[in-house]
C-alpha cells in the first residue's frame, strides 16, 4: 500500500520528480565517466610502460633483483618449464640473459646493458620488432646485435657497422666479442634508448660462458586482472630458490605515481559528490516545503507519522534508484564508445606523448566495478539525504502544516 501510494505521489508532480531523478542521473553519469577515464588512462599507461622492457611478470633466481649479476643466474629446470607451459593464465614467456658490458667503436666507449633474448617470444611480450626503426630484426642463431638508436648515435654506429663488447663472464673470465649491428631500436624511454643492446640468447650464453643459464623469464598473462593470482600460483609452484615479481614490485615508483594521481581524483570525485548532494538535497527540501499542507491533512485524518515517514523514505528510494539505474544504463554505451574511440591528442601534446613511447590517447575503462560502485555511491548519498524528509515527518504539526 505504502509503495503504491509513494509511486503515485511521485507522478502527481512530474516536474519535481523528474528534476530530482535528472540530478541523480547526471551525477551517476559524471561520476562513472570520470572514474572510467582515470582507470582507462592508467591501464593504458601501464601497458605502455611494461611494454618497454620489464613485462608484467618476471621469474628470477632468489636475490637477483637486489644483486643483478651473473652469479645470480639460473638454469630453467624441466619442472619449471612444465609449470609455465601448463599454467593456463600465461599467454607467452621469454628467457633473458642480462649483463653490463663496455661497448666500443673506434675511440668511443660507453657502458650498456646486453640482453640475450629469444627474438620471437621477446617480441610477442614487449613488441621489440615494432620498435625497430632501421635494419633487420634478430633470428635465434643470429651473430649480430640490435641496439638503441641513441646508444648507436653516441658510438657513431650505423646498421652494418661493428661494435666491440667487453665484459666479465659468469666465472670471472673475460667476455668479449665483435658483433655486426643488424638494426636500430627506438624506445619511448630515453634511458633504454641510450643503454640497451640485444643479441640472440645462444650468442649471449656463449659470450658470457653461461651455457643454458638465464637471469630472468619474462611472462605475459592472458588477462592483467589475474596477475596477482598468477604470481601466487607461480611462487608456490616454482618452489624455493626463485623469486616471482610483478611489475608493481619491479617499478614501485609507477605504483606511487598511480596512488598520487588516484588521491587527486578522489578529491575531484569528493567535490563532485558534494555538488551532487546539494542538488539532491535542494529538490528534497523543495518537495517537503511544497507538500506541508498535504502531510498535515494525512496526519489529521489518521495516518501515523511513522507510516508517513516510511512513505517519504520509499519516495526518496524510488527517485534515487531510478536516477541511478538510468544513469548506469546510459553511461555504459558512452564508456564503451570512448574505449573503442578514445579521446586523442593532436599537435605538440601528441608529439610529446609519442616521443616518450606513450599513445597520445585517453581511453575509457569498461570495468563493471566502476559502473556498480559509482551508481551505489550516488544511491547511498540519496538515501542518506532522505533522512531530512523523514525527520520532517516526525516533527510535523498537523494544524500548523494545514495552514500553510
Image (cartoon, helix red, strand yellow):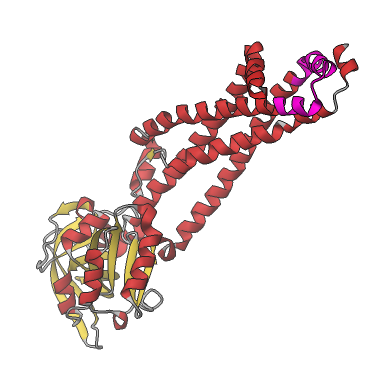
Q: In the image, which residues are magenta? A: 288-312
Image location of residue 135, percent across then percent down:
13, 54
Q: In which image quadrant can residue 351 be found? A: top left
183, above or below 393, in the image: below
Q: Residue furthest right?
A: 399
Relative horizontal placement of residue 191, taking residue 126 as reference (left or right): right
144, above or below 295, in the image: below
Residue 13, can we see it?
A: no
Seen from the viewer's position, the closer of residues 269 and 283 is: 283
Image location of residue 278, percent across then percent down:
69, 29
Relative horizontal placement of residue 401, taking residue 159 as reference (left or right): right
Residue 321, can we see it?
A: yes
Q: In which image quadrant can residue 237 be found? A: bottom left
Count the marks: 0
Image location of residue 101, percent across then percent down:
27, 75
Relative horizontal placement of residue 395, taking residue 171 as reference (left or right): right
401, above or below 198, in the image: above
Seen from the viewer's position, the closer of residues 388 and 171 is: 388
Q: Residue furthest bottom?
A: 172
Q: Main secondary structure of the magenta part?
A: helix
Residue at 46% across, 26% down: 330
Residue at 35% across, 62% down: 230
Q: Was residue 155 drawn as part of the magenta stretch in this picture?
A: no
Image location of residue 325, percent across then percent down:
52, 29
Residue at 24% across, 53% down: 127
Q: In which quadrant of the rendered image does the C terminus lie?
A: top right
Amino acid at each position: 500500500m505504502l509503495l503504491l501510494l509513494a509511486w503515485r505521489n511521485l507522478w502527481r508532480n512530474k516536474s519535481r520528480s523528474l528534476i530530482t531523478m535528472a540530478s541523480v542521473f547526471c551525477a551517476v553519469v559524471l561520476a562513472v565517466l570520470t572514474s572510467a577515464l582515470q582507470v582507462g588512462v592508467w591501464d593504458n599507461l601501464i601497458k605502455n610502460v611494461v611494454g618497454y622492457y620489464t613485462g608484467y611478470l618476471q621469474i628470477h633466481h632468489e636475490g637477483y633483483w637486489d644483486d643483478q649479476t651473473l652469479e645470480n643466474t639460473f638454469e630453467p629446470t624441466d619442472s619449471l618449464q612444465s609449470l609455465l607451459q601448463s599454467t593456463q593464465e600465461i599467454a607467452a614467456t621469454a628467457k633473458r640473459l642480462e649483463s653490463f658490458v663496455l661497448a666500443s667503436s673506434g675511440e668511443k666507449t660507453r657502458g650498456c646493458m646486453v640482453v640475450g633474448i629469444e627474438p620471437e617470444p621477446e617480441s610477442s611480450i614487449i613488441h621489440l620488432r615494432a620498435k625497430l626503426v632501421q635494419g633487420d630484426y634478430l633470428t635465434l642463431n643470429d651473430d649480430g646485435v640490435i641496439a638503441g638508436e641513441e646508444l648507436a648515435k653516441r658510438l657513431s654506429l650505423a646498421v652494418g657497422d661493428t661494435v666491440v663488447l667487453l665484459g666479465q663472464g659468469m666465472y670471472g673470465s673475460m667476455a668479449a666479442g665483435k658483433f655486426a649491428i643488424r638494426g636500430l631500436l627506438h624506445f619511448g624511454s630515453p634511458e633504454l634508448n641510450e643503454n640497451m643492446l640485444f643479441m640472440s640468447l645462444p650468442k649471449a650464453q656463449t659470450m658470457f660462458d653461461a651455457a643454458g643459464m638465464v637471469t630472468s623469464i619474462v611472462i605475459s598473462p592472458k588477462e592483467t586482472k589475474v596477475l596477482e593470482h598468477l604470481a601466487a600460483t607461480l611462487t608456490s609452484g616454482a618452489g624455493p630458490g626463485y623469486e616471482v615479481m610483478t611489475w608493481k614490485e619491479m617499478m614501485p615508483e609507477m605504483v606511487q605515481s598511480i596512488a598520487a594521481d588516484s588521491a587527486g581524483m578522489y578529491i575531484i570525485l569528493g567535490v563532485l559528490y558534494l555538488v551532487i548532494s546539494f542538488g539532491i538535497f535542494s529538490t528534497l527540501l523543495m518537495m517537503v516545503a511544497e507538500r506541508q499542507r498535504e502531510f498535515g491533512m494525512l496526519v489529521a485524518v489518521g495516518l501515523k507519522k511513522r507510516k508517513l515517514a516510511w512513505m517519504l523514505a520509499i519516495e526518496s528510494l524510488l527517485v534515487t534508484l531510478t536516477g541511478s539505474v538510468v544513469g548506469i544504463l546510459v553511461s555504459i554505451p558512452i564508456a564503451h564508445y570512448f574505449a573503442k574511440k578514445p579521446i586523442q591528442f593532436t599537435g605538440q601534446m601528441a608529439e610529446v606523448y609519442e616521443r616518450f613511447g606513450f599513445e597520445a590517447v585517453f581511453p575509457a575503462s569498461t570495468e563493471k566495478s566502476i559502473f556498480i560502485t559509482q551508481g551505489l555511491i550516488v544511491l547511498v548519498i540519496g538515501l542518506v539525504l532522505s533522512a531530512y524528509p523523514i525527520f520532517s515527518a516526525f516533527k510535523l504539526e498537523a494544524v500548523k502544516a494545514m495552514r500553510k
